[in-house]
Image: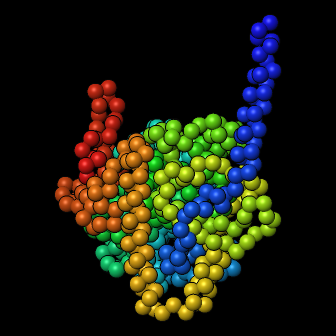
């Protein structure tokens, strides 16, 4: 009898919980995720539309006769294309990519395409992972994406080293979209830790732009490498927001809305403090750039604005229930909105008639502000007790004196990148591979 009397109370509690979830989910707008972030400048955002076009160029069969180029065209010189690999060349181990020498912008670019829904090999890369399977550099990463990064570096190491040494003033940029973004981000970490393999390249010359990034590394790594890795998210894009493992997302591709709704319900019941202390939870990497073009309770698109930050908490933790959650993931749409945002920023600068000298000073100030923001993020990660987070002096952020890689070059010879990655591990008492303890004091 007492149980029957308690049923109405349980029903009320259940209804209140459902109402709370519906309000939080339905009223949550993507623009609120970055409302406290600073606005990006045209100087720092300039490479992003261009790199989107380089990624689109990977889809072309012949760059001398392009058939898919966007309105602003690729602006690529086919003579400067060092290499371009398709699925046959990579034997399905990694997505297609190209290596391009950009003399106009003094840049060496390695661009990787996104997931091909018709290729089983891409799914194999995604499915090669389980939560907490791969521990790397004091954190956790996606095992399949790390393996793909290793394959590309093994294939292109000599070419990259030759160009880095031949053009000492050029930057080395890794970029990718969706699946390729995760490969590019993890490739950047491996290169930063083994800079001697590329002619002792300075850390400040290495950078990565992950377009519509996959969650591929734990929070401590995402914050630690924010000085070299940048992620670009368009409005409601679902992939950087869902902590659902990539393999589960694409297993459920034909019922993706159902999966995202279930994930929303689950995440609503998990406190952010608990999320932060989950060392195996993966995040979008590095500094975040959020392109915002829609506002709450308003119809249509507005002129896009770009916000940027290195957040620790509130790092795209909630999926936005929006009809644009999947369309905002498309590389074509990201390129279009990124170009529009850049043009608006440049028009605003031109209207203000800022002198060239002042622009140079602003650029120097921007670098300093980014360094300070990165340092503050590292400290906040320690304050919030993020697993394996360490204070900034141990990493040097923008300082060339960092010890992220062994620059001696002694004894490594022609070791593969896989062997170099294995150097970060040792066998524990149980016989399993565990991270070497001295690594955290590098």
Q: Quadrant of residue 244?
A: top right
- Image coordinates of residue 211 in percent, x first then y, are 57, 63
Q: Is residue 78 placed above or below 426 in the rendered structure?
A: below
Closest to the observer: 186 or 379? 379
Q: Quadrant of residue 299?
A: bottom right
Q: Measuring from the top left, give residue 208's x and y in whole percent.
A: 46, 65
Rendered view: 339 above or below 393: below
Decide: is 351 above or below 11.
Answer: below
Residue 8 in view here? yes
- The residue lying toward the viewer, choosing from 268 and 113, is 268
Q: Is residue 134 above or below residue 78?
A: above
Relative placement, left or right, of 327 versus 273 is: right
Q: Residue at 42% x, 68% y: name it.
A: 370
Where is residue 78 shown, x and y percent of the image? 53, 80
Residue 232 sits in quarter: bottom right
Please state the horizontal and vertical placement of residue 260, each as a whole percent of the image: 69, 44
The residue positioned 46% from the left and 47% from the top of the image is: 218
Residue shown at the point (38%, 54%) measured from the top left: 378
The answer to whether residue 266 is left or right of residue 254 is left
Left or right: where 361 falls relative to 406: right
Nearest the viewer among 438 and 27 is: 27
């Amino acid at each position: 009898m007492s149980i029957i009397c308690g049923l109405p109370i349980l029903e009320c509690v259940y209804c209140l919980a459902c109402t709370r979830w519906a309000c939080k989910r339905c009223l949550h707008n993507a623009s609120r995720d970055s409302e406290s972030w600073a606005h990006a400048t045209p100087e720092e955002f300039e490479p992003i539309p261009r790199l989107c076009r380089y990624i689109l160029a990977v889809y072309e069969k012949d760059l001398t006769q392009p058939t898919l180029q966007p309105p602003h065209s690729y602006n690529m010189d086919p003579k400067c294309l060092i290499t371009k690999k398709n699925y046959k060349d990579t034997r399905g181990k990694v997505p297609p990519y190209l290596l391009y020498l950009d003399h106009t912008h003094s840049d060496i670019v390695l661009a990787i395409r996104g997931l091909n829904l018709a290729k089983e090999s891409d799914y194999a890369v995604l499915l090669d992972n389980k939560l907490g399977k791969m521990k790397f550099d004091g954190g956790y990463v996606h095992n399949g994406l790390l393996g793909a990064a290793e394959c590309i570096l093994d294939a292109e190491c000599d070419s990259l080293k030759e160009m880095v040494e031949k053009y000492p003033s050029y930057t080395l940029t890794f970029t990718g979209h969706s699946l390729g973004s995760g490969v590019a981000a993890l490739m950047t970490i491996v290169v930063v830790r083994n800079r001697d393999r590329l002619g002792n390249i300075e850390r400040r010359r290495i950078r990565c732009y992950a377009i519509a990034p996959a969650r591929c590394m734990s929070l401590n790594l995402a914050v630690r490498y924010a000085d070299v890795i940048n992620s670009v998210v368009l409005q409601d894009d679902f992939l950087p927001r869902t902590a659902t493992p990539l393999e589960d997302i694409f297993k459920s591709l034909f019922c993706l809305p159902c999966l995202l709704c279930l994930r929303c319900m689950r995440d609503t019941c998990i406190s952010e403090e608990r999320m932060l202390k989950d060392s195996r939870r993966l995040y979008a990497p590095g500094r975040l750039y959020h392109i915002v073009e829609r506002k709450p309770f308003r119809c249509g698109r507005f002129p896009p604005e770009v916000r940027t930050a290195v957040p620790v908490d509130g790092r795209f933790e909630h999926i936005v229930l929006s009809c644009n959650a999947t369309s905002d993931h498309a590389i074509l749409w990201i390129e279009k909105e990124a170009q529009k945002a850049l043009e608006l920023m440049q028009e605003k600068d031109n209207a203000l008639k800022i002198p060239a000298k002042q622009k140079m000073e602003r650029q120097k100030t921007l670098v300093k502000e980014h360094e300070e923001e990165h340092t503050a993020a590292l400290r906040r990660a320690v304050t919030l007790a993020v697993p394996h987070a360490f204070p900034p002096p141990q990493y040097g952020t923008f300082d060339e004196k960092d010890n992220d890689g062994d620059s001696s070059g002694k004894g490594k010879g022609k070791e593969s990148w896989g062997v170099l990655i294995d150097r970060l591990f040792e066998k524990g008492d149980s016989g399993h591979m565990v991270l070497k303890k001295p690594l955290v004091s590098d």
